[in-house]
Image (tube, helix red, strand yellow):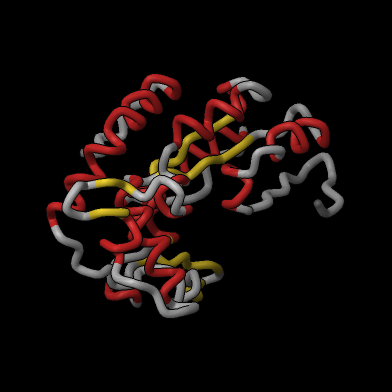
Amino acid sequence: MPVTYKDQITIEKTPGYFVTKDAPRRIFAMDPATKLLLVVRDPVTRSISDYCQAATKHAMRPYEEMALLDESLGLVNTSWGAIKIGVYAKHIDRWLQVFPLSQIHIVDGERLIEQPAQELAKVENFLGLPRFINDAHFYLRGFKGKFPCLLRDGRPHCLGEKTKGRDHPVVKESVLERLRDFYRPFNAKFYQIVGKNFGWS
């Protein structure tokens, strides 16, 4: 972490920390007052997005073959990282053994895309920052209008075009339904733990 002055907030972004076993204790040891931001989205959609990202780096079998061990039996490949990361209840449980829920803010990933200013206003509140971000800071040019870009000093700053707003493959409805069934109890537990229903089907 870089040196941070008393009037500054430093944000470090590493998505892999959420699923890393020792991360909660190590971060707590560094600073027990750390505030944590966790961006979540529908775990089925997230798994497809993770698949798309991996597919840009190397050849991949079709998503259906990665997600299910046996499509005819509907056996979910629970050892595949893109599936495991979406079992949010398991991972948040480990963090809550170290940090109180009051130090963790859950960001709704779908809302962050659809209503970025409103979702980031909640982050500003959580971090104790004065309200600054509003709708005028965003626009939907590029990425086929799927992902908001930030306007800073009147100029666009978009997340990498190779990493955000990619077209997802068309996945068989039977596979999507099986994955929804798989995640449903984990989602319900996650909603209960964090006190918010994200409405993932």
Q: Is residue 162 above or below residue 132?
A: below
Say which quadrant the C terminus sits in: top left
Question: Does 35 sit left or right of 165 as displayed?
Answer: right
Q: Is residue 17 above or below residue 189?
A: below
What residue is shown at x 38% (from left), y 63% (from top)? 148
Q: Nearer the viewer, residue 187 or 83?
A: 83
Please tell me how many numbered marks the rendered image carries.
0
Q: Position of residue 119 (x, y in %)?
A: 41, 43
Q: Nearer the viewer, residue 66 or 199?
A: 66
Q: Is residue 44 above or below residue 60?
A: above
Q: Nearer the viewer, residue 131 or 75?
A: 75
* Residue 8 in view, yes or no: yes
Q: Position of residue 149 (x, y in %)?
A: 42, 67
Q: Position of residue 93 (x, y in %)?
A: 54, 26
* Residue 119 in view, yes or no: no
Q: Quadrant of residue 56?
A: bottom left
Q: Is residue 136 above or below residue 130?
A: below
What residue is shown at x 82% (from left), y 36% (from top)? 30
What residue is shown at x 78% (from left), y 42% (from top)? 7
Q: Position of residue 199 (x, y in %)?
A: 25, 35
